[in-house]
Image (cartoon, grey):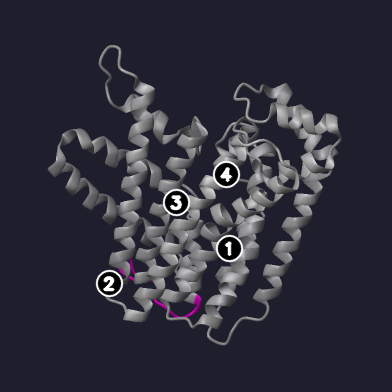
Amino acid sequence: MPADTPALVQHALEAALTEADRLAAAAGAETAVLVQAASRAVSGGKRLRARLCLAAAGACGAPVDSALAPAVRAAAALELFQAAALVHDDLMDASDTRRGEPAAHRWLAVAVESRPGADATRFGDSAAVLLGDLLLTMSATALHDAVADTEREVRRAAAAVYAEMSTEVALGQFLDLVAAHVPWHGEADLDRAWRVVRAKSARYSVELPLALGARLAGADDATTAWFTAIGSHVGTAFQLRDDLLGVFGDPEVTGKPAGDDLREGKRTVLVALAALAGSDADREHLLGALGHPDLDAAAIAQLRALLERTGAVAQVEALIAQHTAEAHRLLEAPPTLVADTAELEALVAAATQRSA
């Protein structure tokens, strides 16, 4: 993969933002702030989904050395989709920050001057809904443009992957919302937590970006299935690592307050395992504290100790190691149509060994 791949994806993103700027200018000067917020939303980040898409496409022989290449434009579509998902996720979780900066709804609340007595918080929340919608539209447009000149079967296959991803993310987000709202039901909560891992993160973060890249290169079903099998394992390890970072991560690295997942009431696999393995007192403490936005450092420290004491942290680390090993095993036997797995191997390591 070319060393300037991030720059190529950035170029494609800037083209999408330029078009949004043009439409905003026609709609009126007031709408410029929404495009500015969109630009904020797509800046920074690891570009993991874009890099996975390009790694799969490049491994199958598709060009990835031009900002106009279908795979590069599709990679930009994935980044726009990711930005939309994060905007909506932060709003639903009432998160204050993202990557060390104000979350989109917090930024929008103060980006427009309020009249006396106006509810700036409600304005920011409402504007963030529209921002997410705008980014989703930009993403769909970017994918449409990416495949416009490709063969019919490639267009159909790419559109199917994108539609599957879009639907699954919405369903996974709803599962996550339900999990934080309903009473604890033991094994059923663990089962739901695993379904959230798959639908909300593993599939859309790793598996489907790989599938999209493979399909854009014209890969057959067997080759695409190899990529998705790797993606399933890597995506699961990626989300389990994310669950650990949401509790134990360094705020200076993650850009989020320490223990934020606990304040937001996330019933992750980590939390479900601890609740099942702990004593009645442990479970009552954990579930009673989960979701309280005012948890202080001492309370977070107690919950961290509980998660470790019950063996849940060790279990999650073991699961990460298991899924990572399975991904590496698959990488050792690529299909004949896959020419080079070096970039994919590097991304597997980056996704499973990360600290942010």
- Disc 4 vs disc 1: Cβ atoms closer than 8 Å? no
The kind of secondary structure element at disc 3 is: helix
350 w.r.t. 290: above or below = below
* Disc 1 to disc 2, C-alpha distance: 28 Å
Q: Could you give the CA–CA distance between mark 4 and mark 2, rounded to whole angstroms? A: 35 Å
Q: Residue at x 53, y 57 (%)?
A: 205
| Label at residue 347 | 1
Mark earlier in primary sequence (4, 1)? 4
Q: In terms of sequence position, does the residue under pointer 3 or pointer 4 come before the other?
A: 3
Q: Earlier in the sequence, mark 1 or mark 2?
A: 2
- State the extent of the magenta-drawn residues as a range: 59-69
Element assignment for label 1: helix
Question: Which mark is nearer the camera, 1 or 2?
Answer: 2
Q: Is residue 159 above or below residue 219?
A: above
- Asked if the magenta segment contains residue 354, the reply would be no
* Disc on res. 199: none
Q: Which residue is mark 3?
A: 82
Quarter of the image where the C terminus is located = top right
Residue under the image location 63 percent in, 47 percent down: 242
Could you say which quadrant of the image residue 341 lies in? bottom right
Please indicate whether residue 165 sits to the left or right of residue 107 in the image: right
Query: Which residue is label 4 attached to?
Result: 176
Residue drawn at (56%, 54%) of the image: 201
Give the prevailing secondary structure in the magenta stretch. loop
Q: Marks 4 and 1, how far apart in space?
A: 27 Å
- Mark 1: which amino acid? Leu
Q: Nearer the viewer, mark 3 or mark 4?
A: 4
Residue at left offset 46%, top offset 60%: 165
Q: Which sits in the foreground, 171 or 206?
A: 171
Which residue carries the number 2 mark? 148
Q: Is residue 154 above or below residue 28?
A: below
Query: Residue 298: x, y in percent?
Result: 73, 22
